[in-house]
Image (cartoon, rainbow, N blue to C red):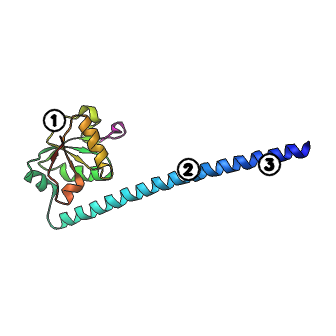
Amino acid sequence: MLLYIGFVSVFILLIIIIILGRLKIKNLKKILENCNAEIARIRTNDSILYDWLKIKQYGGTLEQYLKDNRIFNIAIYGCGVLGKVLYNELKDTDIHVECFIDKKYENYSFDVPVIGLDSIPEIDVIIVSVINYYDDIVEDLLKHGQNTIISLEDIIYGIGVPVKHE
């Protein structure tokens, strides 16, 4: 009987080890996926910042691009690195940054209001600085009645004209 209890205990312990091992593997896969997504985000931001710097080195400005497209009153979607850099480039220009928009708006504080999707004021365009999730963000903005949207990436690469989404 003692041998049987020992066998059952070892068997149960093996099952627990196998289950925990699988959970760890699943968690490890999830961790790796998150790391890969973060690496992709950082690479994208790095590339955009590099090309933005080249534009500045050759005398170009985002202010001029926006003026050329008759954009004077904007909101910046995203309070991350690219959003902050965009704000800093535009804050002492003729382009008025009305606000930042972010789903986690209560976590941020800037010189201009940081708001959620439900309280966007009237502006010329929303510049989305979150590149890797642009399509999802456009979908959210459309659901909230916003339809004049452009990606910071499109501005940097000179292919962007504000798109009025229908």
* Amino acid found under the numbered disc labelled 3: Val
The residue labelled by disc 2 is 27
Expressed as whole percent of the image width and height from the top left, the position of residue 90 reads 18, 51
Label tally: 3
| Range drawn in magenta | 102-109
- Secondary structure at numbered mark 3: helix
Magenta-span inclusion, residue 105: yes
Mark 1 surroundings within 10 Å by alpha-carbon count, few (fewer than 14), some (14 through 19), many (20 or more): few
User: Is 85 a magenta residue?
Assistant: no
Q: Nearer the viewer, residue 81 or 30?
A: 30
Q: Secondary structure at mark 1?
A: loop
Disc 3 from disc 1: Cα separation: 68 Å
Label 2: how many Cα within 10 Å (few below 14, some 14–19, many 20+) = few
* Mark 1 or 2, nearer chain start: 2
Q: Where 10 sits versus 61, above or below?
A: above
| SS assignment for the magenta stretch, majority | loop
Instruction: Estimate the x, y position of residue 164 in percent, counting from the top left.
Output: 15, 43
Q: Disc 3 or 1, which lies upstream in sequence?
A: 3
Which circle marks residue 122 in the picture? 1
* Distance from Cα at disc 2 to Cα at disc 3: 25 Å
Which residue is label 3 attached to?
Answer: 10
Q: What residue do we see at 20% from left, 58% from top?
A: 156
Q: Is residue 139 left or right of residue 39?
A: left
- Say which element carries label 2: helix
Amino acid type indicated by mark 2 = Asn
